[in-house]
Image (cartoon, coloured by chain):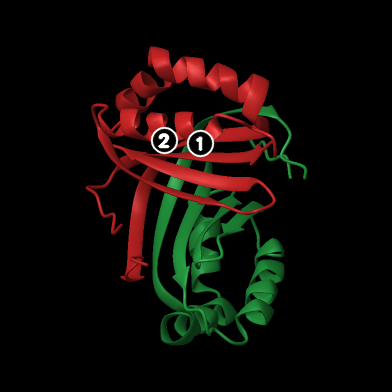
Chain colours: A red, B green
Amino acid sequence: MKLSFEIPYYAVIFTSLRKMDAHDYNQIAERMEQLSRNQSGFLGIQSVREDKGLGITVSYWKNIEDVLNWKMNVEHREAQSKGKSDWYKGYEVRICKVEREYDFGSLDI
Amino acid sequence: MKLSFEIPYYAVIFTSLRKMDAHDYNQIAERMEQLSRNQSGFLGIQSVREDKGLGITVSYWKNIEDVLNWKMNVEHREAQSKGKSDWYKGYEVRICKVEREYDFGSLDI
């Protein structure tokens, strides 16, 4: 999963709390990940969710225009709407410019 | 956990893969969280780890100087060193300026 990109680039931090009975979530979440990978400027994605429902997903993008294009993608907007009505108790989204990075070892499980 | 700060502020994204036999990790991780909360410019922290060992922790800071001061804190540096030798197979750190944010509902479990 090693991610190392040319600085500066963009990170979108998506912190969310899922409802426990969110049916059809996995299928559409997978579809959204596929779709984002084909978007212009997509660099990578890292995602972790705990059993209690709290999750953090960070996606990485070449520049701010790529982030905003993905945000406005029609199919993605439908999923966002479903996220509010069906899947999430709450979420926070932060769009950030990555200015520095460093690492150690490897994240490959 | 609702976090909403005056833009721009800073986010430190720490993505890590823990060794499964990392003894004394919890104690020192807790101490580091306490210590960071008392640092100048600390705004908040969000943390998620999966059973397989992959975790994402995002801490939020008022400005870049606060981030760098915390990075250089003596006790924190000792923990960083222990992180490399004992606790983590790998990690990535990204220091980011948060430029936009939006949210929905609440993250309170």
* Crowd band around label 2 with a 10 angstrom C-alpha radius: few (<14), some (14–19), many (20+): few
Q: Secondary structure at mark 1?
A: helix
Residue corresponding to mark 1: A26
Tell me: residue A14, above or below residue A68: below
- CA distance separating discs 1 and 2: 6 Å
Letter of the chain that mark 1 sits on in the rendering: A
Where is residue A64 drawn, in percent x and y? Answer: 34, 28
Q: Nearer the viewer, residue A53 or B8?
A: A53
Where is residue A70 drawn, in percent x and y? Answer: 37, 23
Which quarter of the rendering shows the C terminus of chain B?
top right
Tell me: residue B11, above or below residue A62: below
Where is residue A53 drawn, in percent x and y? Answer: 66, 46
Do the residues bearing badges 1 and 2 touch, measured as CB atoms within 8 Å? yes
Tell me what residue is drawn at x 58 percent, y 51 percent: B61
Tell me what residue is drawn at x 39 percent, y 40 percent: A59
The answer to whether any part of residue A72 appears in the image is no
Is the same chain shared between marks 1 and 2?
yes
Residue B103: quadrant of the picture? top right
Residue A30: numbered disc? 2
Which quarter of the rendering shows the N terminus of chain B?
top right
Tell me: residue B42, above or below residue B23: above
Residue B74: quadrant of the picture? bottom right
Q: Secondary structure at mark 2?
A: helix
